[in-house]
Amino acid sequence: MDAIKPQRVALSRELSEFLVELSIAVQKHSMYPGGHPSLSAAVAGLTRRVGRLLDERTTLVFGVARRQLIIDGVATDPDQPVLRRLAEGLHRHHLGAVSLARGLEIDELEQALRALSVEIDKHGPLGLAPPGRMLEWPHLRLHPLTFDRLELVGVEPDNAGRDKPAMGRAAELWIGLARAALATSDRRETEAPAVAAEPAAVAQAIDAHEGATAYDQVIIGYLLQIAQELQTASGDEAAMLRGRTARLIGALKPETLRRLIEMGGDQAQRREFVMNAASGMAVDAVIDILKAAADASGQTISHGLARMLSKLAAHAELGHEQVRPLAEGALREHVGRLLSGWELADPNPDAYSRVLQHIAHSAPAGGTLPTPPIVPGQDALRLVQMSLEVGDAGPCVDRATDQALGAGQFGDLLRLLASVPPKGDAVAARLRVKLTAPDSITALTAHEPFDIDALDQLLPLLSLDGYEMLLDALASSASRSTRRRLLDRLATTSLDVAPLVTARLHDGRWFVVRNLLVLLQRLPGLPAGFSPSPWVRHADSRVRHEALVLQLAIRDERESALRTALDDADPRIMRLGVLAAQLDCPPSVIPAIARLAHNARLDDELRQLAIRALGRSADARARDALLQLVDGGRTLLGRAKLAPTGPECIAALGALSERWPEDAVVAPTLALAASSPDPLVRQAVERRGGRR
């Protein structure tokens, strides 16, 4: 039946991107706590995208199947992991559809996302919630799908637990359709008796839901999937599904079937549905669907043709054994030809038609094919320049801009904005928005080495979303030079990027955490309540060092940071603590500094820094620690003597002379040093006004 094989209708790129962004937003709300900066950015971006989609329609409705979503009569790919995750999550919530209306507020969307992200095992599905639990807002509604006690006659129930394979695809589709059709907004599973999913009952339920857009969206979505399944399915289960679907369609009122066909998308989508039905469904169902599709598409099937098709259907169902396959094949072939004949002849010349065909295919729906370059090389920039000169833009200009950005021509585009023609203000504003979009910033930093001058020009125009992309590049770039340049520029922003930085500190890569801590040191302020204490004991000493630098700058945590630094085994971190103690040495850290001053295994410079820190303190413990450093014991005659002359001894004597010149305990030691034959020792105890 090659003559009637349809081309699959793909979901438009705008709707596909909306569903992907919605799935990511729900996932983020399940991962991050309330108030996390990633959540507000996700909700704001999704609200803007919904607003653009609702510019050309009053409502946006999509239905929910077990593994797919149905929107504009098109079912999403069940193998697309992001969309499948969203469908499965909504299905577990016992939701049949989601509808959004023009005027949607960011608070409404945020509340709905938060509701969808709750743990189902802990709080239960939203669709089975008590009547008081909110499932709708002024411009957003979650439509429950609560009728779940269905019995499928002829299919063994799955009583073997999770390890047993689920029922076949055909049976699953019919159960999903019946469950969606029999669902009501006020009927609870605990109140509903088991019901056999018979076609007549399902048809009666569908007839009763006239005008319910979200409901119709789910039903037609299942019918589309069933039609696609029956194209290739075989066996007893497929035959059972084919028979049930035929009885369902035959039992529907004509106006109901037309309503569903109209809900199934544009003429191309309706044509695909009928072709799929013609390839796999029972022939009597094909006739009913064909008539409804013709009516919905404004086409006319003559009474004579309808009688001929009905007669072929009768022979295909009830004719002689040798006649049935011939009649069925002829019926399906005629339906395919009839659908092909619904298209008007192309009035355009062949050459012009080829040009239009190329333009139409240069941006395929759903983004499944690469977009060919609209113009070669520098001609993309020339097209953007012409757009600025004439003050008008369009899809071709947008694709030319994308092509230039993909080629790394940010500097060239910015030079075009340096002198905008009088008519080009609107186009220039649109181009600036494009250049500062998160995707553009990602593309800019993806080139090694990236255009630093272009980034410097864009920085004043960036939003927090743009800085998030720079933080991504800081974490992912393999070039130390690139990371250093990004770090320098991130630190100069006037925007409050600190929450974005702290949210990334749990990265497993040490250099990413180190760079983020350095960035926090350079920023003007830290988020309220933030503490670097989780990182002061990091396994990597370079991370510990930067965390302690940050903690030393926090007044309430400075003393704790000093103790941690002085107890660290890394000499660089010990040096950091000793230098900080020279500025202000709390009494609680004096024992730790004294240990460093007395530790002969440390290098002389670190010990001398510790001695100077002790000399800055007026605490008696610091004095006693310094006296121990210069105490050389007793001579054979019992006289006190100084320790051997060395850098530590000289430094300790200087500290004692400067801090405790009149102290009675220190005076004998200073007098002994003043009378020493060693000039270095005598100089160490000299007072500013003269000698002792």
Image: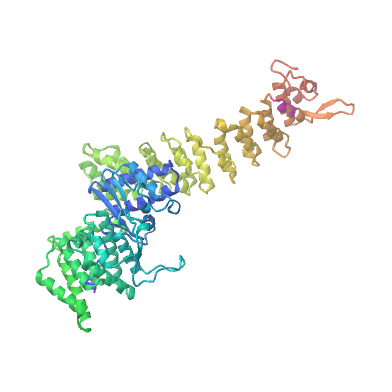
Q: On the picture, is 327 further left or further right than 660? A: left
Q: Give yes or no for residue 396 being in the magenta stretch.
A: no
Q: Position of residue 456 (x, y in %)?
A: 39, 38
Report which quarter residue 415 is drawn in.
top left
Depth check: give the residue in front, 426 or 374.
426
- Placement of the C terminus among the 4 image quadrants: top right
Depth check: give the residue in front, 28 or 287.
287
| In the depicted structure, whether residue 241 falls above or below residue 217 | below
Report which quarter residue 434 is drawn in.
top left
Q: How many marks?
A: 0
**Can residue 300 be seen?**
yes
Q: On the picture, is 587 further left or further right than 191? A: right
Magenta stretch, main secondary structure class: helix
Residue visible at 22% across and 48% down?
Answer: 56
Looking at the picture, the colour scheme in use is rainbow
Q: On the picture, is 612 further left or further right than 52? A: right
Q: Position of residue 259 (x, y in %)?
A: 20, 59
Furthest residue in direction top, as rendered: 689
Depth check: give the residue in front, 22 or 304.
304
Residue visible at 12% across and 71% down?
Answer: 305
- Placement of the N terminus among the 4 image quadrants: bottom left
Q: Give yes or no for residue 622 being in the magenta stretch.
A: yes
| In the depicted structure, whether residue 164 falls above or below residue 494 | below
Q: Position of residue 459 (x, y in %)?
A: 38, 38
Range shown magenta: 619-624
**Can residue 412 be seen?**
no
| In the depicted structure, whether residue 517 falls above or below residue 682 | below
Q: Position of residue 579 (x, y in %)?
A: 62, 32
Depth check: give the residue in front, 595 or 686.
595
Furthest residue in direction right, as rendered: 637
